[in-house]
Image: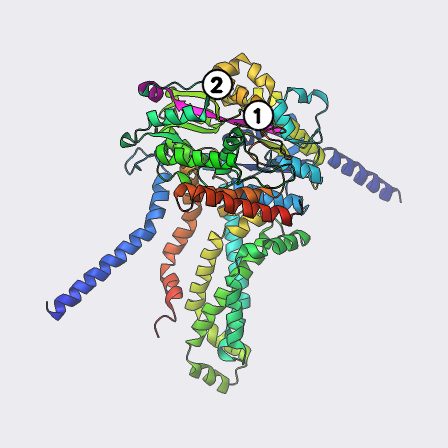
Amino acid sequence: MKSLTKTAIACAVSLAAFNAFAETEITIATVNNGHMIEMQKLTPEFEKQYPDIKLKWVTLEEGVLRQNVTQDIANGSGLYDVMTIGMYEAPIWGERGWLEPIDTSGDYDVEDILPSIRGGLSYNDTMYAAPFYGESSMVMYRKDLADKAGVTIGDRDSWEHIRDAAAAMNDPDNGVYGICLRGKAGWGDNMAFLSAMANSFGARWFDMDWKPQLTSDEWKNAVNFYVDLLNKYGPPGASGNSFNENLALFNEGKCGMWIDATIAASFVTDPKQSKVADKVAFAQSPYAVTEKGANWLWSWALGIPAATKHAEAAQTFVRWATSKEYIKLVAEHNGWGAVPTGTRTSTYENPEFTKAAVFADAELKAINSANPNDSTLKPSPYVGVQFAAIPEFQAIGTTTGQMVSGALSGSLSVDKALESANRSADRQMRQAGYY
Amino acid sequence: MTLTQQRKLKTILVGLASWAVALLLFFPIFWMFITSFKTELQAISVPPQLFFEPTFENFSIVQERSDYLKHAWNSVVTSFGATILALIIAIPAAYSMAFFPGKKTKDILLWMLSTKMLPAVGVLVPIYILSRDYGLLDSKLGLVIIFTLMNLPIIVWMLFSYFKDLPKEILEAARMDGATPWDEMIKVVLPLSVGGIASTGLLSIVLCWNEAFWSLNLTASEAAPLTAMIASYSSPEGLFWAKLSAASTLACAPIVIFGWFCQKQLVQGLTFGAVK
């Protein structure tokens, strides 16, 4: 009996000791962007600081990531403990209770996070995803070509002026096109750009009764301007170009101007990948009738699905990866020019960062000028600058993108494209029960 | 032009056409291979560069970032596992339909083939939920089952065609000697069909190795095969062609080498039944 008791005690002690040192393994789904890859490389630093948590990474292509994490979270599969999501998903999933609120207590310094980014990742003032890096849109242009053509680009120019500048810089015989813009169909491709552009023309996706407004004069003006501009001064095959294609063209020295995500600034000024690294200058996104919503707002953020079995460890990791200390850690490893930007005020207040990143001021100004809760001239019922944060938008945005891409390639007129897109959007909104 | 000259000309033209088609098919693989030795800037340069100073940087990045051996092992286990399981099911099925056809045999065969006509995405949600409920998400067993089901119709059809070509007299002779249907299959049909089974198996392995849709949707960190590794190098924001090409080259290499050694059987498998 005595030996049985001893054995039982020994087992209990061993079990307790095992539990004390038990490792929690968390699986993180992410996308293949430079900053995310850097985060993976810094895994040993995290594991050194938190030896009882081990990280497992799953890197996926953006479309696949969206599909996988949506399946995972909607079905409560619990495959992932932390997932990389965007500003579009965070408020929608937060509202549905699919995400754990981010723990912003203690020394996390949530007030340091840029207000527009924080607002875009929140629902009812609760932050459901922590920003890993943020971005807006801006004009990146070739200073040398602008000087040669005798044009100046102001801090925030009108679309008319940008068109004139594109005309002046356009030199297709020498392989230089006045302007490169997204043309590839997709709610996150051409429609991300075009929504912001349409905002500046006074357009909105939906009126206050959720009725699609794609056949409004504002949308027609914006899309006609865009199609005309790209067809006259854009590269051939522009309807197939999105971020990466335009990045390749710009870095090869084939674009006079490129209006796209601010994250591109770090690529086009990197001599390792850009032939024009020392010839680039920046300006704010152009406007037409209003500056409201003229530049978009996006953030890649880390969310914790409600189905996770390791919520505490996931919170620890998310707080670490989106902290001020993490940004400093990246700077220690790779220099201030390589830190994830667009998330914290303290980053832009750091003189070492502003010295290393020539685009810092333009980027901060662009992000701060975007307000996801008030991005259209006429009142609108949705949150989001270049998208409407409702589940139906992905399909509506992509269908509209296909129509506009068709108008750009000349297969249908702008009016027809917008009419078809509006009809399709109207059908989807009706089916979804908005009216 | 004499008849001999006409024949020679025909041979030359057919040869040239064959080379043209072969080069056309091979070109993307060749381009992927050379792109893997370029820098990202060289990979996107216009006009494309054919001559450049090669770099191994992309391969070292892939080695550093991905657990290649783990992904490769997952590919091996799922491809071979699914092929073996599919053959175990398909051989008796094809045998019974080839030698003991019923009234509905043709309908069954057509029905089996018709399952391949449904786009995979059409059954994604039910398969995903079933996998979740049976604990098969992100498991090699789950992929083996899916790959087996995916290739079963093709394997049954190929084996059925092969078995149909076997002379019936041999089976009749075995039957005269008292062989049961099971004996006929094991002792007569299988030894005579080793070539056909091998080539069918090879084709199945290649199809499983290259499968991406289910691999990407049903796996995460544990069971992800090489196709998932390749996909992880595509980036929405940033240049990635050279690194993606390096990952693709590494992923293709084992199956290309395997196929090279087995090309005789593969060609036989793809062409049997074509000429009677």
Residue at the right extreme, as displayed:
A1
Q: Which residue is mark 2?
A: A357
At 57% from the left edge and 25% from the top edge, which residue is drawn?
A: A370
Q: Could you give the CA–CA distance between mark 1 and mark 2, rounded to whole angstroms?
A: 21 Å
Residue B54 shown left or right of residue A408 in the figure: left
- Near mark 1 (Cα within 10 A), the count class, few <14, some 14-19 or many ≥20, is many
Q: Nearer the viewer, residue B98 or B180?
A: B98
Q: Position of residue B75 (x, y in %)?
A: 50, 50
Q: Nearer the viewer, residue A363 or B275?
A: A363
Q: Which residue is mark 1?
A: A370
Residue at the bottom extreme, as displayed:
B176
Mark with earlier residue (1, 2)? 2
Q: Position of residue B34 (x, y in %)?
A: 34, 41
- Near mark 2 (Cα within 10 A), the count class, few <14, some 14-19 or many ≥20, is many
Residue B26 shown left or right of residue B154 in the figure: left
Q: Position of residue B178 (x, y in %)?
A: 52, 85
A303 falls in the magenta region: no
> Which corner quadrant holds the N terminus of chain A?
top right
Q: Position of residue B208 (x, y in %)?
A: 49, 55
Q: Residue type at mark 1?
A: Ala
Stretch in magenta: A131-148
